[in-house]
Amino acid sequence: MQVTIRSLLTTCFVSSALLGAGAEATAATNPAQKAMEPNPRGQILSLSCASCHGTDGKSVGVIPSFYGKSPEYLETALKDFKSGKRYSTVMGRHAKGYNDEEIHLIAQYFGTVWQNNK
Amino acid sequence: MSHNISRRDFNKLLVTGVAGSALGIFGTIKPAFAAQKRVVVIGGGFGGAAAAKYLKKLDSSISVTLVEPKATFYTCPFSNWVLGGMRTMQDIGHTYTLLKSKYGINVLADSATGIDAAKGTVTLKSGKVLNYDRLIVSPGIDFKWSAIEGYSESVSQTKMPHAYEAGAQTILLHKQLLAMKNGGKVIICPPGNPFRCPPGPYERASLIAHYLKAKKPKSKILILDAKDKFSKQGLFKKGWDTLYPGMIEWRSGPTGGKVTKVDAGSMSVTTDFGVEKGDVINIIPPQQAGKIAFKAGLTDASGWCPVNPSTFESTIHPGIHVIGDACIAGAMPKSGFAASSQGKVAAASIIRLFQGKEPAPPSLVNTCYSLIGTDYGISVAGVYSLSPTGIIEVPGSGGLTPMDADADHLREEAMFAEGWYKNISQDIWG
Ligand SMILES: Cc1cc2nc3c(=O)[nH]c(=O)nc-3n(C[C@H](O)[C@H](O)[C@H](O)COP(=O)(O)OP(=O)(O)OC[C@H]3O[C@@H](n4cnc5c(N)ncnc54)[C@H](O)[C@@H]3O)c2cc1C
């Protein structure tokens, strides 16, 4: 029996790649794992908020907490700060930095991130 | 190129192949094995500690080693409050206990002495060598000691503190203020741009005035500035007129503010317009990226580190991300808030890169609160995003406390300054 190294290597590579992909697929379909995977843009938009509002929106000081709020509540609040409908000293200046789609992503992130901590 | 091989070699290859794919599987399920990614972080300040914590928080499978020589990190933010007598040193000290115990970060009380970007290694003062897949460098600033004639590190440690790194320097300046006579003169000398915390020297003048007004009301503060304007200038001046009328004088660079020489013996400073004597003299020298950034060749001619504005990866040495004061971050000021925001962007980007995925476009934030008096807070805020020219402030966002803000507004901002400090320190070290 004569085989070539190249075809063999290809086979080995493909099989391990497939096995690897299989393992990943299992992890991704596991609901607990899936909940851990936030939208990457939503995540990067949201992480800085913690500096004033606390990690995951759980404030330990006088600045309002929003941990545990729903995505709908957060989206409305951010839009109202942006328009000035809701009074603020500082928050309006921040909210003006985001368009509607970004506000939606931020609201989705913080509106769900606390569920993973349960 | 194909080679004919024998049946025996074929069997051997199969075994290797199987072992290889088995490793692959374990790598996916249990990354503590061969595939575990290693990140080393140099510096446990606002940038580095935030990056280390968020790497672990977002992907606990990554091995994170944080190198920081200090057992307790004293924050520059709120160190002006210590000078004003509103906080103690203990209030502004943070340790790495929780980063170790709660997040599983390997914290080494050591300093980095060398980086080999080609080999992917960091050498520590103890002699230990660390291997990394990605490195984050957040060493803060270093001072250009020779920029002002007569000033030196030893003068800063004995007679004229900079107090621009918190700790022993803060304590020295505070002691000098406590020992000063009523009717004494405090001179503060801020540098030209860019430097750490653009509103820092002016918040400092405000809170020293707060202390002097209560305890030594005949005293004066003279700010000799290398610049011709400064951060939140209108708001600061209005606050000074309201709370400390006649106590604080600010001189711009072109009107005799630029200090070229100091004399520790006679406690005096020299400007183009003459010599000024002070009872307490606070020299804030011009700055550049922390030493290790120079040693590793991460800086450019400006003395700061050029980075890819999306991931904060060095444009000089791939695989190394530079964040915080040391990096060139476009429109962002050098602040603790900015450093931690950059640390989080770097952490999220590194995780995506490890997954072979493209990092998400960055979004960054800064707010610098400054306290002028107990119930008098002001701020500058900014949201930043990526443009073809680098990091810019999102048009229409951010900005300053309004000039006509009423007392309630200013009181709320003072409370928020305190709230910000609690949350950011908890978010980074807690
Ligand atoms: C008076 C004052 C007031 C300020 N107020 C505010 C404020 O209100 N809000 C705000 O946002 N910012 C404020 N800042 C700015 C803020 O302190 C800095 O911007 C921030 O600390 C920058 O973070 P960093 O991670 O770049 O550096 P740092 O926080 O300075 O951290 C750098 C760390 O790296 C370590 N290090 C250095 N070299 C090595 C090495 N070779 N090996 C290992 N470790 C090393 C150092 O020990 C240090 O702990 C203020 C600054 C001053 C001076």
Image (cartoon, helix red, strand yellow):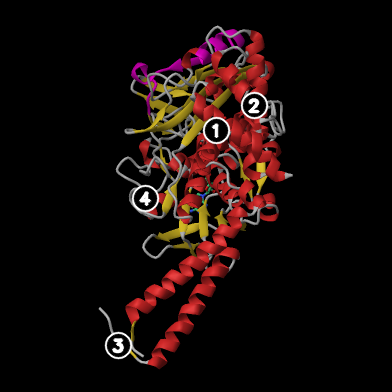
Q: Amino acid at mark 1?
A: Leu
Name the residue that disc number 1 marks. Answer: A105
Name the residue that disc number 3 marks. Answer: B4
Asked if residue B249 is positioned above or below residue B61 in the image, the reply reads above
Residue that extends furthest to the front in the rendered view of this protein: A1
Name the residue that disc number 4 marks. Answer: B298
Q: Look at the numbered disc 4 and give the secondary structure of its residue.
A: loop
Q: Earlier in the sequence, mark 2 or mark 1?
A: 2
Q: Amino acid at mark 3?
A: Asn
Other-residue count near label 3 (Cα within 10 Å), few / some / many at <14 / 14–19 / ≥20: few
The label nearer to you, 1 versus 4, is 1
Disc 4, ligand 1: is the CB inside 8 Å? Answer: no
Q: Chain of mark 4?
A: B
How far, Cα to Cα, is label 4 from label 2? Answer: 45 Å
Specify whether residue B236 is painted magenta: yes
Visible residue check, residue B182: no
The label nearer to you, 4 versus 2, is 2
Q: Chain of mark 1?
A: A
* Towards the viewer: B208 or B219: B208
